[in-house]
Image (spheres, rainbow, N blue to C red):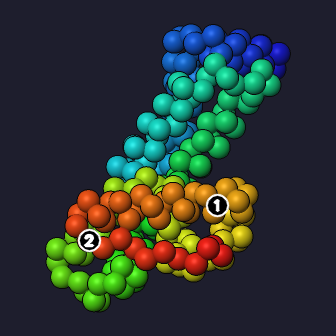
Amino acid sequence: MTDESDDRAACLRGLRRGSREAFERVYSAEKAGIYGFLMRLSRDPHVAGDLFQNVWFKLARSAQSLREDTDIRAWLFTVARNEYRSYCRAQLLDMSRLLVLGRELACAGLPDGGGDRELAAVEAALASLGDPDRELLLLVCVEGIEARVAAGMLGISYDALRQRLARARKRLSEALEARELPALPERSRST
């Protein structure tokens, strides 16, 4: 067992130094397990393939900052799991966006249905926002999750959430104005 643990330690040292050979050894040893795990989670070879690539990109970017005691296999599976969870959150946001558009149009003072042009513009404005802004707006403004609860869900302070929410609302209003739609009305300052 000493040879195996010595080999893992040497491989980790190589990764931390940026060794291509060490990366290739880890890739060769773990690729089947990581892809199989993602395939079983997603049940879609295209999704699994995209997430699989993300795992290896993250290793390439983070290898030099790995701690000396890192269990690289556990690290890779944790990254794979987190990639899948992020994918699921994005999918839920995209699906809920379709349900939310009517509410967003009403908030913007547009009649429900608002016409194809307005609907497309609001959808494009939401899509133009980064994931963090879109996620925050959907959670607090659309789903009505209390701001303190949302802050806990996102792992940020209440004050940080309020700042991010104000910036997200501003960016959405700017995106709507760029599409010549009325900006979203100001919300109460309590959120």
Q: Which residue is mark 2?
A: 181
Q: Is residue 72 left or right of residue 186?
A: right
Q: Is residue 37 left or right of residue 6?
A: left
**Residue 118: which disc?**
none
Question: Residue at image x 48%, y 75%?
Answer: 186
Q: Is residue 115 left or right of residue 128?
A: left
Q: Earlier in the sequence, mark 1 or mark 2?
A: 1
Report, in whole angstroms, how far the alpha carbon at label 1 lies from the one at label 2: 26 Å
Where is residue 167 shown, x and y percent of the image?
51, 57
Q: Quadrant of the N terminus?
A: top right
Return the residue nearer the eye: 87 or 159.
159
Q: Indicate the secondary structure of the residue bearing disc 1.
A: helix
Looking at the image, do the residues carrying marks 1 and 2 touch, with CB atoms under 8 Å apart?
Answer: no
Question: Residue at image x 64%, y 60%?
Answer: 161
- When asked about the image quadrant of residue 34, the answer is top right
Disc 1 residue type? Leu
Is residue 95 positioned above or below 66 on the image? below
Disc 2 residue type? Leu
- Outermost residue, bottom side: 112
How crowded is the residue under tag 2: few (<14 C-alpha within 10 Å), some, or many (20+)?
many
How crowded is the residue under tag 1: few (<14 C-alpha within 10 Å), some, or many (20+)?
many
Query: Is residue 130 at least partly visible in the picture?
Result: yes
Q: Which residue is mark 1?
A: 161
Where is residue 171 shown, x and y percent of the image?
42, 58
Question: Residue at image x 48%, y 31%?
Answer: 57
Return the residue nearer the eye: 52 or 125.
125
Where is residue 21 shown, x and y percent of the image?
53, 11
Return the residue nearer the eye: 112 or 183.
183
Question: Residue at image x 38%, y 65%?
Answer: 173
